[in-house]
Amino acid sequence: MPPDLAARLASGERIEEPVAIVVAHPDDESLWLGTALTRLGDATLIHLTDGAPEDMRDAGRLGFAKRDDYAGARARELDEALDTLGAQPRRLAYGFVDQGLVWRLPELIERLRKDLAGMSAVVTHPYEGGHPDHDAAAFAVRRAFDGEVVEFACYHLFEGERVWGRFRPDPAAPEHARPLDPDEQALVGRAIDAHATQRDVTGGWRPVAERWRVAPRYDFAAPPPSGAALYDGFGWALTSAGWREVAGRC
């Protein structure tokens, strides 16, 4: 593959080389790289979790009595979103529990080594402390794959607020942005709407651009580049300090 997949994704060109997309949850593909999915001619889309945490607070609020029922709903929403986009990647679903990827890192890394073999490049999350599963995806991909790794912008904490669809600036990792035209914005908006269980999470946010960069070299033993993790404010059992402790043993 020619160098700098990030720039090629931002250019809007069609890409035929084999590319893997590794995302933490069903809906990450719609939120962060909706139009790119239609331009990757040989894409493998890997979902690491089934989108359903062991903690049933969200599932119960939505009327689900069982975690598996919530996971099933999220899988159906994913099917609808990909149909809406007209995207037909090869798909792999690992089915790990949402919010629990860090506990399964050795197994996750081993599975990714096998499934990423032969890929020209991998597209995944940045390490920014937005969600522990996002950070685990970034960590595992870097351990499993020696080739080009490109990141899409998702969300993180900046000056006390959640920032959507933007990277934390890093002079060593310049970004490439592709503005979405009105038709593309509407298409991606419909795909995001297909993830109906997540509406309270995403609210009215809709992307007006897709952003890409070559993954920088992270120190995963250090706090995320923003200095603080968004999810530390959610009251979850797993904190960013706990995440780093577990990841540091892998």
Image (cartoon, rainbow, N blue to C red):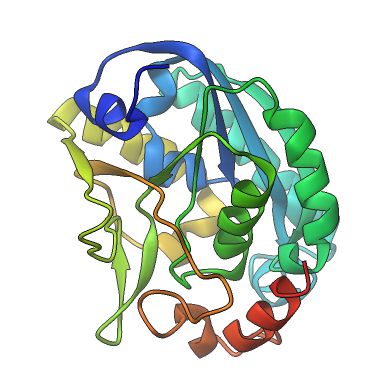
Q: Residue at x 30, y 62 (%)?
A: 164
Q: Is residue 3 above or below residue 239?
A: above
Say which quarter of the image contains residue 40: top left
* 197 in relation to 135, above or below: above
Q: State the quadrant of the C terminus.
A: bottom right
Residue at the image position 66 percent from the left and 51 percent from the top: 143
Query: Looking at the image, which residue is at 23% across and 36% down?
Result: 185
Asked if residue 228 lies left or right of residue 235, the reply is left
Residue 226's image quarter? bottom left
- Above or below residue 78? Residue 19 is above
Q: Does 236 appear above or below 31?
A: below
Split into 4 quadrants, where in the image is the N terminus?
top left
Observer-nearest residue: 22 or 139?
A: 139
- Give the camera-side residue of 202 and 226: 226
What's the residue at 52%, 80% (across, down)? 222
Say whether residue 203 is left or right of residue 108. left
Determine whether, in the image, residue 18 is placed left or right of residue 76. Answer: left
Where residue 97 appears, x then y in whole percent? 78, 60
Q: Position of residue 91 (x, y in %)?
A: 67, 26
Q: Is residue 128 left or right of residue 208?
A: right
Res 24 seen here: no
Q: Name the spot of residue 10 as percent of width and height, x first.
A: 24, 31
